[in-house]
Image: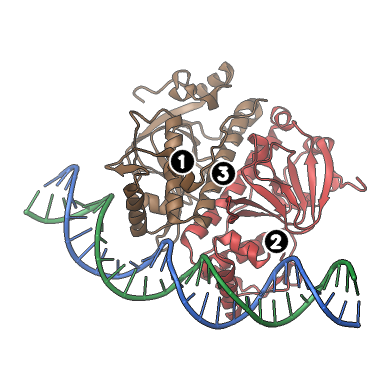
Chain colours: A brown, B red, C green, D blue
Amino acid sequence: LPHPTSCFACPLRALPVFDSITPEELAFIQEHKAAEITLRPGSPILHEGQEAERLYTLLFGWAFRFKTLPDGRRQILNILMPGDLVGLQAKLFKEASHGIESLTAVTLCAFARKRTWEVFRNFPALAFDLTWLGAREERLVDDVLLSVGRRSAAERLSMLVLHLWYRARGLGMVQDGALVFPLTQAHIADTLGLSYVHTNRTLQELRRQRLFDLSNGLLAGVDETRLRALSGYEVVEELRPLF
Amino acid sequence: LPHPTSCFACPLRALPVFDSITPEELAFIQEHKAAEITLRPGSPILHEGQEAERLYTLLFGWAFRFKTLPDGRRQILNILMPGDLVGLQAKLFKEASHGIESLTAVTLCAFARKRTWEVFRNFPALAFDLTWLGAREERLVDDVLLSVGRRSAAERLSMLVLHLWYRARGLGMVQDGALVFPLTQAHIADTLGLSYVHTNRTLQELRRQRLFDLSNGLLAGVDETRLRALSGYEVVEELRPLF
DNA sequence: CGGAGTCTTGAGCCCGATCAACCGTGGTGG
DNA sequence: CCACCACGGTTGATCGGGCTCAAGACTCCG
């Protein structure tokens, strides 16, 4: 651990979602932060079927949750960005029913093992946060499922681009109207339930219509208005209710 | 409230999932059980976009969670059966991003409004249950998403039938090898992301192969072995970890 | 310079969508 | 009692969005 980030100086604290954390809670978190782990792009963070590991928070970078079938078909369930929990399901159940893999270089905050119950007993506000983050992730999966089940390829793609664009902007990752975009077209295909080839063609079509510009791992020129119209995107409230 | 079910006599308590509830917790639940609500089949329980309502538990009957697009396309997210939470997302966020509708006649246990926080503060074990039930539902949605994104129509249908069969059996709803099955083919189509017509044809094909018999709202003759082989169904652990 | 990973393009086909009837059953009201 | 209708299921015909197979191009890197 060369220079572990202090929870007190955690860059994520600036986000509105983490507004209501008290100093005591922060001290608890700091005390139980067991390690800070950095991984290269494309590293497995959690294997499908792996038994309960630590609970992590994604501090930096992108990752994704996925499931695979025996013959190799893969479905990406959702994209993880800084502030997201990693491994809640694996903690709550005997084993993870999904895998997690990093897209970029990634930094994780690892919390001490077997402390989950202690959180519920001693820090109800943090326990509430766990529940809330879990429910938020479920809502994301709900949205993806609606897309994959009922939207056309162009609609799905618009949706995804817009969704990631808004999330990244909320995290301050958009600079000069551009975003470093680490998903390959294979990732996009597996997220949207499309084939690789068809994803490519749809992408080109949207690019041709100047709805956005995605090339060389950079997303820019996002025409939010037209993308919203095409995809039927709805802005969702991210605010946590006050107690 | 003619004859509200006492929580102490709740039929759901026999389920392994609810093993570890203590008498104090039970008393708390009983105290905050505000009402017992019964609805006819096809009743809306929660509207899309509706603001925070009560938190319910499904005591009896089937329901489903869904999202719709402005033009009417609908995606069913998951099927609710006795013991499932209803409206956790609506409680945690300002408004529900999905609707809920009953499939059969349904009985709901309603808990007092604005007590959610009290649960976290005073009954950590119950708070843990909320989190756990939420995570369990997310896992269900994950599974549906994998099906809709990456499985063929026949695989999806086998999966769904087998999944509902196992869940219902675990709840003691299978009698004499048969199950009252309240989903119409339209519901099945919206669950699997298929068209109405194609669902019908796929259903007939599986029926012809004697994989199961589904007619007149009754599911029977379920050939578990062959359905498992066809769909790649994996049995999942439902046990809650002990503290 | 070769190889791996990513992206692109073409051709052909098929799974599943769409459109359009039609059937059977149960409820409802004149 | 019957005409009517709503609803769920069934069937046929046709279409097309997206899949598959196959090859080639570009980039980065050792």
Give the distance between the C-alpha atoms of the residues marked 1 and 2, in whole angstroms.
36 Å
Q: Is residue B121 above or below residue B235?
A: above
Q: Chain of mark 2?
A: B
Q: Nearer the viewer, mark 1 or mark 3?
A: 1
Where is A194 relative to A233, above or below? below
* Identity of the residue drawn at 46% across and 56% down: A152
Q: Which dot, 1 or 2, sits closer to the camera?
A: 1
Residue at 60% x, 35% y is A132
Query: Is residue A128 left or right of B115 when viewed as pictured?
Result: left
Q: Is the residue at mark 1 from the same chain as the one at mark 2? A: no
**Residue at the outermost top position:** A23
The three-letter amino acid code for the residue at tag 2 is Ala
Q: What chain does mark 1 sit on?
A: A
> Measured from the top left, where is residue A51 in percent x and y?
50, 47
What residue appears at the point 46 percent right and 41 percent down from the top-left corner? A163
Q: Closest to the observer: A52 or B211?
A: B211
Q: Which mark is residue A163?
A: 1
Q: Is the Cβ of the residue at disc 1 closer than 8 Å to that at disc 2?
A: no
Q: Nearer the viewer, residue B225 or B198?
A: B198
Q: Tell me the SS state at disc 1.
A: helix
Q: Position of residue A46 (x, y in %)?
A: 44, 45
Q: Is residue B54 left or right of residue A175?
A: right
Callout 1, which amino acid? His
> Which kind of residue does numbered mark 3 sit on?
Glu
Disc 3 is attached to a residue of which chain? A
* Label 1, residues with CA under 10 Å away: few <14, some 14-19, many ≥20: some
Q: Which mark is residue B168?
A: 2
Q: Are marks 3 and 2 on the same chain?
A: no
Q: Position of residue B25 (x, y in %)?
A: 77, 36
Answer few, some or many: residues within 10 Å of disc 2's Cα (few below 14, many 20 plus, some between 14 and 19). some
The disc placed on residue A138 is 3
